[in-house]
Amino acid sequence: MSPLETLRRMNRIAGWPLLLATFLARLPVSMTLIGLLTLVTSTTGSVAAAGLVSGAFALGEAVGGPVIARFADRHGQRVPVLVTAAVDTALIALLVAAVTVDAPLPVLVALAAAGGLCMPQVGPMARTRWVVLIRKGPDRGPERERSVSAAMSVEGVLDEASFVLGPALVGVLTLTLSPTASVLGAAVLIGVFGTVFALHPTAPPGSAPVRGAEGRITRPALLLLAVPMFCQGLFFGGMSTGVTAFADNAGHGDLSGLMYAVMGSSSAVAGLMMASLPVGFSLTARTRVAAGGLALLTLPLYLDHGPATLAVTIFVLGIAIGPHLVSLFGLIERAAPPSRLSQSMAVILSSLILGQSLGSMVSGALADAYGHQGAFALATAGGLISFAVTTLVLRGHWYDRAATSAPDTVGPPPEAPAARATGLSRGA
């Protein structure tokens, strides 16, 4: 399936409005993390303090995400998204006010953690929503599998695109207005487009719990994926802090968001191109190759760079990120219980956020002690650990179509049982 065919298929299933709503509702995640790094760094002069605040926000989301997603699986998506969008908007605005009045660091960390705790779980819920729409649609058999594959691929690209435009928007708002405006802008987007996503008519109802092994998320094939996803989070934490420290030391602190967005642009393109890979190139093999690329392509970061050459280096590095994430989400879709798909996505996604939280905290201290290259070292470590785990531990037969087939149980019961669609089966 080509990238153009993938997008056309998604448009046929639900139209562009849903794609736009899901994208704009998740855009504030990257905006908030990068915006807080920029705002707190410019206000306090400490990259370490900024890393703590940004990391606390990410840590709060890692803890709250699976709880919110589980509630949505059971009771429907509309209410949890509406409530969390409203509360999170208020908490982020309060956090910005606390930063501007020079509140103590523990207060900033506590407010950031509360804001992350209430972040709407748009990414996991959007993936579940597409699966429900596809199941209720006319596609059957192989066509249904292709549609689910397209959904996982496009959702991965939307995630990456949010990490392109989010930092870029932070950079634009910071340059034209102030660092404060960039974080407040994220709060407004959460309130407005979180509400739009919640009220969209495609929001699925909840589903009854499934008893026994079919309803459990404590499956080795699923839980193991938390490790490479955690490593991806370490990578993001190290890279974002390293780029921020480099830009600040070079006297171009306002450009950190724009520089980081360069990496996201190549990552998004590479993720979309995954749809063109041959079927024989398995998901597990793709994950291993991408993880190796994460580690290998960080090595040029340790050379002497100016802003332009560093931008080129991180642009090339982004080529490995999109394939790594898209492949991991495809494996999650195959391993997750259908009745707990949102929660499964959120649990593994929380490991990424947890890794990013830890990465932001540790890399901030490393940047203060050793400069931006100290933060980049954490990104290299994340790639190396992911490559080791996916090569030595991950087993392809755990995610075979026959091993993961199960009746569909997310959302309203189908008229007849059908084999469960498995993610990225067409190379997405």
Image: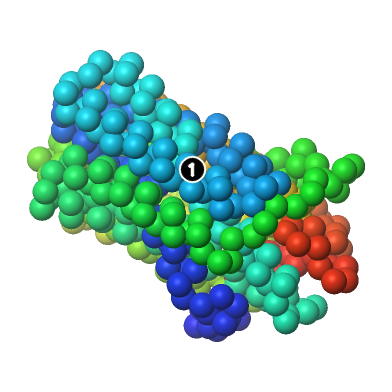
Q: Is residue 399 above or below residue 385?
A: below
Left or right of 142? Residue 166 is left
The residue identified by callout 1 is: 83
Q: Position of residue 180 (x, y in %)?
A: 19, 40
Q: Is residue 88 above or below residue 289?
A: above
Location of the N terminus (image quadrant): bottom right
Left or right, 220 with respect to 186, comes to right
Q: Position of residue 27 (x, y in %)?
A: 38, 54
> Camera-side residue: 302 or 238?
238
Q: Is residue 84 visible?
A: yes
Residue at (40% x, 34% y) in the render: 115
Identity of the residue drawn at 53% across and 41% down: 352
- Residue at 13 percent across and 44 percent down: it is 178
Looking at the image, residue 226 lies above or below residue 401: above
Q: Amino acid at mark 1?
A: Val
Q: Quadrant of the C terminus?
A: bottom right
Q: Circle 1 — which element?
A: helix
